[in-house]
Image: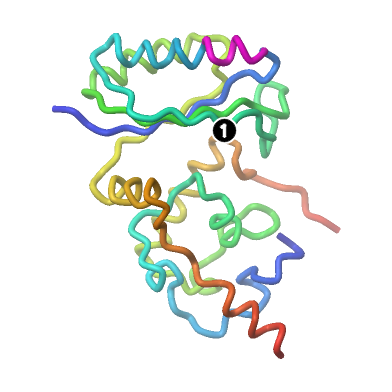
Amino acid sequence: MINNPSHPKKGHLKNRDCKFTKAGFEYIDYKETDILERFINDQGKILPRRVTGTSAKHQRQLSTAVKRARFLALIPYVTENMR
Amino acid sequence: MTNFYEMTYILNPVLDEEKFSEIVEYVNKLITDNGGEVSEVEEWGVKKLAYDIDNKGTGYYVNLYFTATPNVIEQVEKNMRIHDDIMRYLTLKYDSKMKRHYELRKKGELPVLFEEEEENNEEDN
């Protein structure tokens, strides 16, 4: 994640539009870890809405999806901070 | 009243292929014996875990979809909990939104996050 150029914290996000709304997501699937990984930081924390611009509705769905994926060890609960 | 469910479970990776399919059969049988109907089973195979579960770094993932009544879940989960080689399981009840998502996924028409455009722009700058 630290080398991910499309990571929302890298400042490439100029518009604050919700990406999920734009793409027409109805449900965020915990199995799609490549999507989830864009919305967590390198420690494995969920990024806040003010950083990603996600709508409140999709942020709630996202947090559920991330937590399900964590439970099934698809994405980590915590990662050591890379130095 | 029947519902549509999705279940993912992780098996002990130490076992061999035969044993894997045996357990998959066992779980499917648990569902059908209790009056459920399995519609799709997808085996993801051995995958690396994001963190260790029971001191194991990998796990054999199985993902399945089925229709059943709520009391079936109770029976199935009770049996899965005491099974030694099932390390973890997650059952989800599907609502209408999730079902639509599932249909789209089957057709391969899932919405994508538009990222390519923005990446191209970055290269231009």
**Quarter of the figure that contains the C terminus of chain B:** bottom right
Could you tell me which residue is drawn at 59 percent across and 41 percent down? A74
Could you tell me which residue is drawn at 47 percent across and 64 percent down? B112
Which residue type does callout 1 highlight? Answer: Trp
**Quarter of the figure that contains the N terminus of chain B:** top left
In the rendered image, residue A39, in percent from the top left (x then y), is placed at 56, 61
Q: Residue furthest left?
A: B1
In the rendered image, residue B103, in percent from the top left (x then y), is placed at 32, 47
Residue stretch rendered in magenta on the structure: B16-22
The residue nearer to you, when weighing B76 against B123, is B123
Which chain is indicated by disc 1?
B
Up-down: is B32 above or below A46? above
Q: Is residue B18 magenta?
A: yes
Q: Quadrant of residue B91?
A: top left
Could you tell me which residue is drawn at 53 percent across and 29 percent down? B43
Q: Which residue is mark 1?
A: B44
In the rendered image, residue A45, in percent from the top left (x then y), is placed at 61, 55
What is the chief secondary structure element of the magenta stretch?
helix
Up-down: is B86 above or below B41? above
Up-down: is B2 above or below B95? above
The colour scheme used to paint the residues is: rainbow
Q: Residue furthest bottom?
A: B125
Q: Residue furthest front?
A: B107
Q: Quadrant of residue B30?
A: top left
Q: Is residue B37 left or right of residue A76?
A: left
